[in-house]
Image: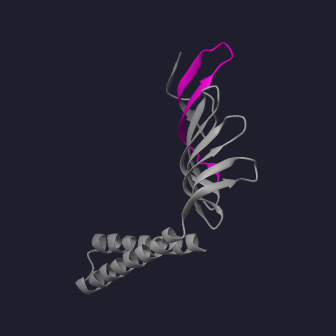
Amino acid sequence: MNSEIYEQAFAEYNKALNELITLRKDDRDNDTLNETIRDIEQAKTNQKERRKIMNSNVTNGKLTLPNGGKYEGEILNGEPNGKGVVKYDNGTTFEGTFRNGLPNGKCRQEWVNGMYLESVYKDGEPVDGIDKCKFIYDDGSYYEGDCINGNPEPNGWGKMY
């Protein structure tokens, strides 16, 4: 799978980069440092080549997802991969970056009534942390500001309107 190739190249690159940082901290001999630099350059080249292969297979298109959502965006191997938008029959939209069919990276979910939640996702799940949201109450007042761990309710710094 192309995403696995990309992940492998990325891991090689990070490993080589960490070795270089360690060598600079340890101030080891120049031969070892030069060898590490060559490894980093090779990892960068491999990563660029693998990214070209992966990107050459990415297409823009439309899919109907198992949950009924209509996806439009970048597709790889028949799944959302890259930037895209999912629209649901109830008017809710989900926009962001996908990998292997799941949200990965910064995403924004917006409901018909104007509520939204911006979260960072990994493998389809919100990453624990502070998100941005707008929460609308039954009386029409609303909170806009921080939310915690993907929960679209007020929690943190924000304003009530």
Query: Hey, which residue is sitting farthest top in the picture?
Result: 139
Residue 134 vertical position relative to residue 13 in the rendered view, above or below: above
Picture coordinates of residue 57, whole percent (x, y): 54, 70
Residue 113 vertical position relative to residue 30 in the rendered view, above or below: above
Residue 49 lies left or right of residue 116; in this view the side is left
Residue 82 lies left or right of residue 13; in this view the side is right
Residue 22 painted magenta:
no
**What are the residue bounds of the magenta stretch?**
123-145
Q: Residue at x 66, y 64 (%)?
A: 78
Query: Hey, which residue is sitting farthest front in the picture?
Result: 61
Model colouring: one colour
Closer to the camera in the image, 144 or 32:
144
Picture coordinates of residue 75, whole percent (x, y): 59, 61
Closer to the camera in the image, 118 or 84:
84
Picture coordinates of residue 76, whole percent (x, y): 59, 65
Q: Residue at x 69, y 41 (%)?
A: 88
Closer to the camera in the image, 79 or 147:
79
Residue 142 falls in which quadrant of the image?
top right
Residue 107 seen in the figure? yes
How many numbered marks are there? 0
Residue 142 painted magenta:
yes
Residue 123 seen in the figure? no
Picture coordinates of residue 140, whole percent (x, y): 63, 14
